Image (cartoon, rainbow, N blue to C red):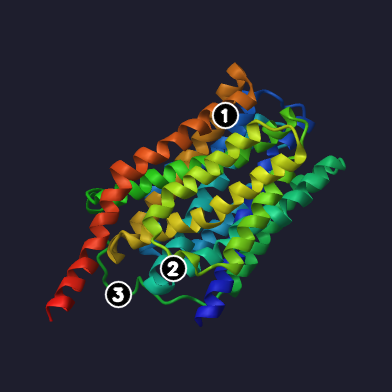
């Protein structure tokens, strides 16, 4: 498969699988129409998907190491399709909603780890930053194209049309996987994939997992953003669409940016941008300022998401990349499962505005110690080989 065809195929696969997840950002609004209004129940309904995907991450990494990427992507996309069907048929039955959200979480986990591991192995170091940036445009595009359409369905009262939208997108993902040219087989020859112990003894791996978790916590704020927007009598799509448009512009028109900058120092900057944008959103009741917050968030998300995926591959040897990718998504899922649940409890105690403001102020302030005590030593370590080469060159 040519490089050009590869990255475009990966982009559209990301578009469909993330479209399924993103449409459910408005699940709370749908459930309100069905008279399910408890903040705690809504928090669990949103967070269960991510909790389930979190619990299976290590096992998913094991599957990806043992079966072909195409097969695991088929299992994952097919599972998502079944999960969306189950959720659509559950109505307001809380047990059914939570079960099928968990089922989708497991299936999407398998798909995402499979496609990301394949990217990390198939794309060279020199092109990794630009490729991850370009492909990840597919993961943000649903926020611009699918979420506004889904919100329009809900606003117009087309409740059934909304809940059957995700099954249609999941089916498109299955059909797209079927058209994919089978990738190079990494499983036919005897290959040592390394162990989790080898992975976690690497300080750079532990650091990138922590940074990824903090960044994903800000990304997970989008899951509950509809509640914040409702509290301010604003449209959630003002923030979501501004974020999506900015992210897509960054990823499609500046894909080589991450190949040109030192990627490690960019991590705390991206976290500061996204958390800072969420803090701004809590202080405004004006649509324009809310939209500007979405633009700032989109700038951090546009480069920050592919940045942390690329860093996971940069800082681990090839034999550990399947497990590193699996654990990177594991920690992202931890953040996505905990964030809506935590916001639900904080909102019950203090209101949704103060819940957002306090949580993301803590994350914003954490970026300084993250850099000085964790990232900076890793960055210096990665610069050592190039310095030694320079010394050797000058001696010659």
Q: Is residue 53 visible?
A: no
Badge 3 or badge 1: first in the primary sequence: 3
**Helix, strand, or loop for circle 1?**
helix
Q: Residue at x 75, y 42 (%)?
A: 288
| C-beta proximity under 8 Å, tags 3 and 1 | no
In space, the residues marked 2 and 1 are separated at their CA atoms by: 34 Å
Residue ID for mark 3: 189
Categorize mark 2 by other alpha carbons within 10 Å: few (<14), some (14-19), many (20+): some
Instruction: Determine which residue is flagged by label 2.
Output: 259
Q: Position of residue 156 (x, y in %)?
A: 87, 43
Q: How far across and down, in percent of the image, does residue 148 sit?
A: 76, 50
Contact check, label 3 and label 2, Cβ < 8 Å = no
Q: Earlier in the sequence, mark 3 or mark 2?
A: 3
Q: Nearer the viewer, residue 308 or 164?
A: 308
Residue denoted by label 1: 357
Q: Marks 3 and 2, how far apart in space?
A: 32 Å
Q: Nearer the viewer, mark 3 or mark 2?
A: 2
Q: Are marks 2 and 1 in contact (CB under 8 Å)?
A: no
**Occupied quadrant, residue 77:** bottom right
The mark that comes first in sequence, 2 or 1, is 2
Neighbourhood count class around disc 3 (C-alpha, 10 Å): few under 14, some 14–19, many 20 upward: few
Closer to the camera, 308 or 367?
Answer: 367
Count all numbered tags in the image, as a single digit.
3
Residue 254 numbered mark, or none: none
Query: Residue at left 40%, top 45%?
Result: 211
């Amino acid at each position: 498969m040519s490089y050009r065809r590869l990255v475009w195929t990966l982009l559209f696969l990301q578009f469909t699988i993330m479209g399924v997840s993103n449409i459910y950002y408005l699940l709370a609004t749908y459930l309100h129409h069905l008279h399910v209004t408890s903040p705690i129940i809504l928090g669990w309904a949103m967070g269960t998907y991510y909790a389930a995907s979190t619990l299976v991450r290590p096992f998913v990494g094991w599957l990806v190491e043992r079966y072909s990427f195409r097969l695991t992507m088929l299992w994952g996309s097919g599972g998502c399709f079944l999960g969306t069907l189950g959720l659509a048929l559950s109505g307001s039955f809380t047990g059914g909603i939570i079960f099928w959200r968990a089922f989708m979480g497991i299936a999407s986990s398998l798909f995402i780890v499979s496609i990301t591991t394949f990217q990390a192995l198939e794309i060279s170091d020199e092109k990794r930053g630009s490729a991850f940036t370009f492909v990840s445009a597919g993961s943000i595009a649903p926020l611009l194209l699918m979420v506004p359409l889904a919100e329009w369905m809900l606003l117009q009262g087309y409740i059934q049309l909304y809940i059957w939208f995700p099954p249609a997108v999941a089916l498109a993902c299955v059909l797209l996987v079927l058209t994919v040219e089978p990738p190079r087989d990494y499983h036919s020859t005897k290959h040592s994939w390394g162990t989790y112990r080898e992975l976690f003894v690497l300080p750079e791996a532990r650091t990138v997992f922590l940074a990824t978790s903090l960044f994903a916590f800000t990304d997970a704020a989008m899951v509950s953003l509809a509640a914040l927007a409702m509290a301010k009598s604003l449209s959630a799509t003002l923030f979501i669409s501004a974020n999506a448009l900015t992210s897509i512009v960054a990823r499609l028109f500046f894909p080589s940016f991450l190949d040109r900058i030192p990627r490690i120092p960019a991590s705390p900057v991206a976290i500061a941008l996204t958390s800072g944008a969420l803090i701004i959103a809590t202080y405004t009741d004006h649509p324009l300022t809310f939209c500007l917050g979405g633009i700032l968030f989109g700038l951090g998300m546009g480069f920050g998401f592919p940045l942390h995926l690329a860093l996971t591959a940069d800082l681990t040897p090839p034999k550990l990349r399947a497990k590193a990718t699996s654990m990177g998504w594991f920690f992202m899922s931890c953040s996505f499962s905990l964030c809506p649940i935590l916001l639900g409890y904080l909102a019950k105690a203090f209101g949704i505005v103060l819940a957002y403001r306090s949580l993301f102020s803590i994350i914003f302030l954490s970026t300084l110690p993250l850099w000085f005590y964790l990232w900076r030593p890793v960055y210096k370590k990665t610069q050592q080989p190039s310095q030694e080469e320079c010394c050797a060159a000058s001696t010659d």
